[in-house]
Image (tube, rainbow, N blue to C red):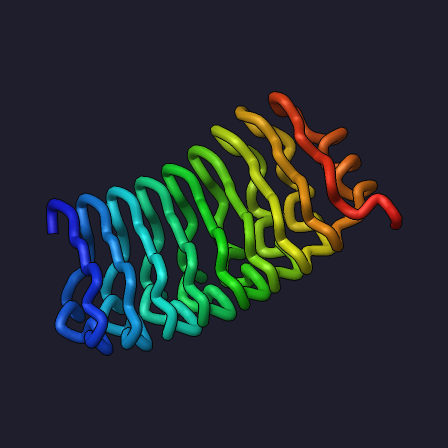
Amino acid sequence: MGGELSIWDNHALGDLDGLSSLTTVGGGLFISSYDALTNLDGLSSLTSVGGRLLLHATHQLTGLTGLSGLTSVGGDLNIDENNGLTGLDGLASLTTVGGSLNITTNAILTDLDSLSGLSSIGEGLNLSGNDALLNVDALSGLSSLGDNLEVRNNASLTSLAGLSNLTTVEGNVDISSNPALCQSIVDAFVAACTCGSVNSGNNDDGC
């Protein structure tokens, strides 16, 4: 498919099995607002998305196993407000995001383990509002970002060890309001990173 594929507000649609032969989307792929969609298995042949990939408010999804063949996203990858998502299983083959990676407001997402193969993000990284996220260990393959870094309002986050190889952020850094993350860890990361302006307040300064 050369253009965009938008699958939007189909509240009774339980699967995408009719798309099993789809290998590439030249533009964006948008999947949003599903109350019945339980899996993405119909996208198992998909290897690349040329534009933005959006997974929004797919509340019955617990993982992303149907995307196991996906190696690259040319634009932004947005994973947000998916209330049933516990992990990112299915993204293990993903190596490149040309735009920004935005993982936000996924209430019970605990880890990013399936992103361990990700080596390049062309623009920014936003990890915000993921209340159950414990660590970012899977992101150790990243060494630079072309835009901003935001790590905010992640109530359970205790470590930034996965970002230890990230030494260059072309934009600004905002690591704030993570109540379980020691301020000393944040300060050490900022000290080792070449970046623009920094907001690193309201983390846990009692440890």
Q: Is residue 51 left or right of residue 160?
A: left
Q: Number of labelled discs?
A: 0
Q: Nearer the viewer, residue 23 or 36?
A: 36
Question: Residue 80, how many percent across, how many down?
Answer: 42, 55
**Residue at 54% of width from left, 24% of height from top?**
170
**Residue at 42% of width from left, 59% of height from top?**
81
**Residue at 62% of width from left, 49% of height from top?**
153
Residue extending farthest right: 207
Q: Is residue 90 left or right of residue 177?
A: left
Question: Residue 29, how many percent across, how many down?
Answer: 23, 52
Q: Nearer the viewer, residue 170 or 56?
A: 56
Q: Is residue 38 left or right of residue 137?
A: left
**Residue at 45% of width from left, 46% of height from top?**
102
* Residue 151, image quadrant: top right
Residue extending farthest top: 196
Instruction: Using the image, determine if residue 26 lies above or below residue 136.
Output: above
Instruction: Using the image, determine if residue 11 lies above or below residue 4.
Output: below
Question: Residue 118, how many percent across, how many down?
Answer: 48, 50
Q: Nearer the viewer, residue 202 or 70?
A: 202
* Residue 83, image quadrant: bottom left
Question: Residue 124, how many percent across, how many down?
Answer: 48, 36
